[in-house]
Amino acid sequence: MLGFALIILFLTGFLELPPATSSIPSPKDSLFLTLSKSGSPQPFKDLFKPFTDWDSQVGCAGFREKHTDLLGNGSKISSLQNADGQIQCGDLQMNHVSILVKGWTWIPDNMDNLYSCRCGLSCLWTKSSLLADKPDALLFETTTPPFLRRDGDPLRVYMDLEAGRKRSGYEDIFISYHAKDDVQSTYAGALFHNNRNYHLSSIKNNDTLVYWSSSRCLPQRNQLAKKLLSLLPHHSFGKCLNNVGGLDRALSLYPECVKDPNEAPKWWDHLHCAMSHYKFVLAIENTMTESYVTEKLFYALDSGAVPIYFGAPNVWDFVPPHSIIDGTQFSSMEQLASYIKSLANDPVAYAEYHAWRRCGVLGNYGKTRAASLDTLPCRLCEAVSRRNGRDAKAL
């Protein structure tokens, strides 16, 4: 969503984080703290050499063997709906479903389309009442659905992807980021970052290790970020803890990240491109709660950086194996910073954090993408079809 995911980055939620000075659990799995036995530090900038070294010393076969249990689209977990699993075509009561999106919403315009879904179901998703003059369902996000639904009225769908997952109380179908609700929509997927410059740099900063950007300066998140960043060389581009001299400095530092030289730059245009110049991106959720894994983490993964993550306790249910550094698995910020510095100078160990994408070992990430906004139109239309749309009995 052009604004959705990014503006949520700054405008949503209430931060619920432990104080930056508090201890956090010790690492439980040596995988997270394993560095290669290469002896002295080996600083590197170009990713291609670490990839080559890792291929010769470890390789995809070795990496797959480590993660055998995650092959085949991940383990069976309750954090994700089985969005790409088999459905019973006989459960569908309609061949065509139209969804009319109502009111102001973060949902991007380019989701408007006619989709060809499973079991021969066609799905119209639109913001135009001209195209959906008799919709089977109305979708609300920032406004409340009608208090009453009479027989023959469209089904009422309400979506809340923020941490509280607050139902309107008047919906027939509820969409959230959580698997327990009617339809799940994760923050992964392409539609959360439309209209960006996707240039990815193979050259990583060797002196400045961490990228951080936040413009909603929530006190506890700022405290946590300040504590860690004080121990590491970093660039902070947002309003919070800015140390680069302004909000537009990324384009001065990385002119290749300018999306269109003929247009005034927008701050989100260069996000992925700028991140890609750093070995690490600090990603701290506004709220630490189960399954609330937002664009902050997935942007970093998409940019080719390694996320340093503070957030959902079940984050590993949503990401590829060995793809992130979970900050809560370290006994102190000092231990975490020491590990990051060592990893930055260990090309083989650093390359291991990129092995999942080079070797195709996705684990649960395949299910995370399958349950994302990208696939929401067909999944919602299937849910509406099961209930028979406008012909569903009013309660």
Image (cartoon, rainbow, N blue to C red):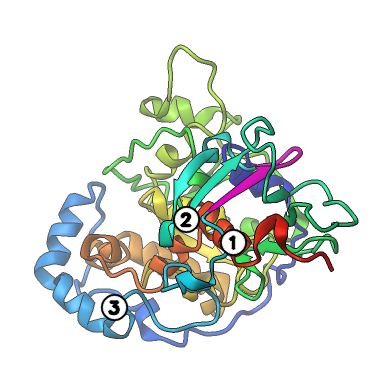
What kind of element bears circle 1?
A: helix
Residue type at numbered disc 2: Leu
The C terminus sits in image quarter: bottom right
Crowd class of label 2 (few under 14; some 14 to 19; many from 20; radius 10 Å): some
The N terminus sits in image quarter: top right
Q: Which residue is mark 1?
A: 385
Tell me whether the residue at label 2 lies in contact with that at label 3, contact meaning CB atoms closer than 8 angstroms: no
Counting residues from the N terminus, which is met first, the one under dot 2 or under dot 3?
A: 3
What kind of element bears circle 3?
A: loop
Residue depth check, mark 3 versus mark 1: number of the one nearer the observer: 1
Tell me whether the residue at label 1 lies in contact with that at label 2, contact meaning CB atoms closer than 8 angstroms: yes
Which residue appears at 63% of the width and 70% of the height?
Answer: 178
Q: Quadrant of residue 272?
A: top left
What kind of element bears circle 2?
A: loop
Counting residues from the N terminus, which is met first, the one under dot 3 or under dot 1?
A: 3
Per the rendered image, the range of residues in magenta is: 96-106
Q: Residue 121 — which label?
A: 2
Which residue appears at 69% of the width and 59% of the height?
Answer: 286
Residue 80: in sight, yes or no?
yes
**Relative to 181, 377 lies left or right:** left
Q: Which residue is mark 3?
A: 71
Residue type at numbered disc 3: Leu
Which residue appears at 43% of the width and 66% of the height?
Answer: 324
Measured as percent of width and height from the top left, residue 164 is found at 76, 64
